[in-house]
Image (cartoon, rainbow, N blue to C red):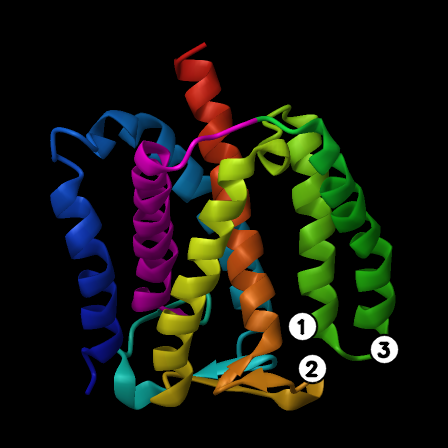
Amino acid sequence: MKFEYLLFNLLVFAGPFGYSFEKQIRFRQHWRSAFPAIFLSLIVYVIWDSSVTNRHWYFNPPYMLEARIFKLPIEEYLFFITVPYACLFVKEVLGLIVKNSFNRALEWVRIFMFALLPMGVFVFQTGKEYTGLVLIAFGVIAFLDRQLRTDTLLQTRTYWFLASVLFFTLVFNMYLTARPLLIYASAYQLDFRIGTIPIEDFGYGLTHLALCNIFYEYFKNRFNP
């Protein structure tokens, strides 16, 4: 069905948007931090996505509209808006039920992630480009978290947030890959899958939403010093 990917995006967005006005959650008050964060992470991942489309993966025409911008269907741009919005909404809901704490001992996570950057460069050069790019992305995330002084990777609530990202990646990408709306070229990845999902997709989703979260916290700190 041509409108399937579009309907998928609308369903992902509808619930979180509707509850954004709920009195206890009040996610609407964070829009001026959320939308710039979503937009900045969208730019980064659209560049990544459009650079490898028709090589690392292909969009299956029967499930989406024909319009393309930089090789990407319109629905893919919506995906980079609706999913981050839903995940940031979940982050704020988690804030109501999960106590946050700052733990300097978690610095080891950031060091480990940064160490993945040179490993990613090496893996990329072996031809496993998707795998390498994911590892590089983890390193960049660690670098930005420290340089922007958001220190999201030192906060315990971040890991609840990232756990929710893994869950949504499992649900959303299982649908996208099982239909399939997306078709992958196994030569550029490890070709190890969880169900129909390449393992790299979990890293892609984690780094995308971690980047969005870093920008989100950065803007929240600026607007609410």
Answer yes or no: is residue 98 visible.
Answer: yes
Q: Which mark is residue 37?
A: none
Check the picture and name the quadrant holding the N terminus. Answer: bottom left
Please report the residue visible at 45 percent of the width from the left and 9 percent of the height from the top: 225
Circle 2 crowding by C-alpha within 10 Å: few under 14, some 14–19, many from 20? some
Q: Relative to 167, is 30 above or below?
A: above
Q: Which mark is residue 188?
A: 2
Which residue position is annotated with label 1? Answer: 130
Which residue position is annotated with label 3? Answer: 126
Q: Is mark 1 in CB contact (under 8 Å) with mark 3?
A: no
Q: Which residues are magenta?
A: 72-101
Circle 1 crowding by C-alpha within 10 Å: few under 14, some 14–19, many from 20? many
- 8 on left or right of 209: left
- Earlier-in-chain disc, 2 versus 3: 3
Distance CA(mark 2)–CA(mark 3): 9 Å
Q: Amino acid at mark 3?
A: Thr
- Closest to the observer, 109 or 2: 109
Distance CA(mark 1)–CA(mark 2): 6 Å
